[in-house]
Amino acid sequence: MIRLVVDTDPGVDDAHAIMAAAAYPDARIEAVTTVKGNVSLERTTANACTILDVMGINAPIYAGCEQALVAESGGAEGFHGADGLGDSAYPPSPRKVEAEHAVHALIRLANAEPGALTLVALGPLTNLALALRLDPTLPRKYRRLVVMGGAIRSMGNTTLTAEFNFHADPEAAAIILRDWTPLTLVSWETTVEHPFSEAQVKALLAHDSPRAEFLRRISQGALTFLEHLFGRPTMLEPDLLAMAAALEPEIVRRKATHHVAVELSGALTRGQTCVDWYGMSGKQPNVELALEMNTERVWELLQAALI
Ligand code: BDR
Ligand code: CA
């Protein structure tokens, strides 16, 4: 049984990832921690409640940081909708959020059962960085950390060179990459190289269930956005790919371990992911990069959540 803690900023693809995890027979979501990212903390937390409602999951939800560690950052409403869930207009969830701060929860949960929990980070790394500063032993106490973030070949989706989650809180990303070893990273380039096909998108949308209705309503805006961009129906699933790598490590068909750091001061390149592809820095490899993944299996994980 894979026991998950999910740190997230839902977000349409965050929702897909949480749905897949909630439906996965051999996994249990033990806690969800939220962070400001795609939309405000208030909204990401409300969205996490709605997603767990739709999936019928009782895991506790802890609200985390409402700002990045150092600099102000914008959201991704243009893609995810003003509400973060495709402007799907689901009524507010009656679910109660826990009083404990997400950062304290991340520390407490790992210390209560060292080695038991897998942490999956789907948003800016603000909560994780603060937790790590308060408790540097966390990397030994979580069984695994899988992160969605970074543009490993600097093909940014937020600036020319930076990916959204790393750009939203570069200092937090830098702390985690430097001090949380080992970790697995699913990058933006790996996401773009593993899109859902038109047939896969159609099949997902064709399901007839309340969960499928939720998926359709939250995803419509993102699908339209991507169709304009690529000229054909497709779906990119950064957070679902990261979740899939946590649920089934063999879904990653090719990986490589390199030293990776985050640029903090570039005038044009703040938040850029710097990968030492050729071992030139002499620094110890610290990050396992997921390079090729089994897209068909990733798709199956999401479609299993719609039944
Ligand atoms: C990441 O940014 C967010 O908009 C998505 O939810 C994903 O976590 C992709 O760059
Ligand atoms: Ca996300």
Image (cartoon, helix red, strand yellow):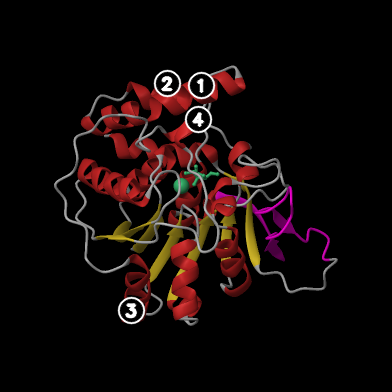
Question: In the rendered structure, are the residues bearing label 2 and label 1 in contact, judged by CB atoms less than 8 Å apart?
Answer: yes
The disc, 3 or 4, on the residue closer to the chain's N-terminal end is 3
Mark 2 is on which residue type?
A: Lys
Q: Position of residue 114 (x, y in %)?
A: 38, 80
Image quadrant for the C terminus? top left
Residue at 32%, 27% (x, y): give it: 217
Helix, strand or loop for disc 3: loop
Label 2 vs label 4, nearer the camera? 4
Q: CA distance from mark 2 to mark 3?
A: 42 Å
The mark found on residue 113 in the picture is 3
The disc, 4 or 1, on the residue closer to the chain's N-terminal end is 1
Q: CA distance from mark 2 to mark 4?
A: 10 Å
At label 1, counting other C-alpha atoms closer than 10 Å, the crowd grade (few under 14, some 14-19, many 20 or more) is few
The disc, 2 or 4, on the residue closer to the chain's N-terminal end is 2
Foreground residue among 301 and 8? 8
Q: Position of residue 282 (x, y in %)?
A: 82, 73
The mark found on residue 235 in the picture is 4
What residue is shown with label 2?
202
At label 2, counting other C-alpha atoms closer than 10 Å, the crowd grade (few under 14, some 14-19, many 20 or more) is few
Foreground residue among 247 and 35? 35
Q: CA distance from mark 3 to mark 1?
A: 43 Å
At label 4, counting other C-alpha atoms closer than 10 Å, the crowd grade (few under 14, some 14-19, many 20 or more) is many
Whether residue 67 is visible, yes or no, is: yes
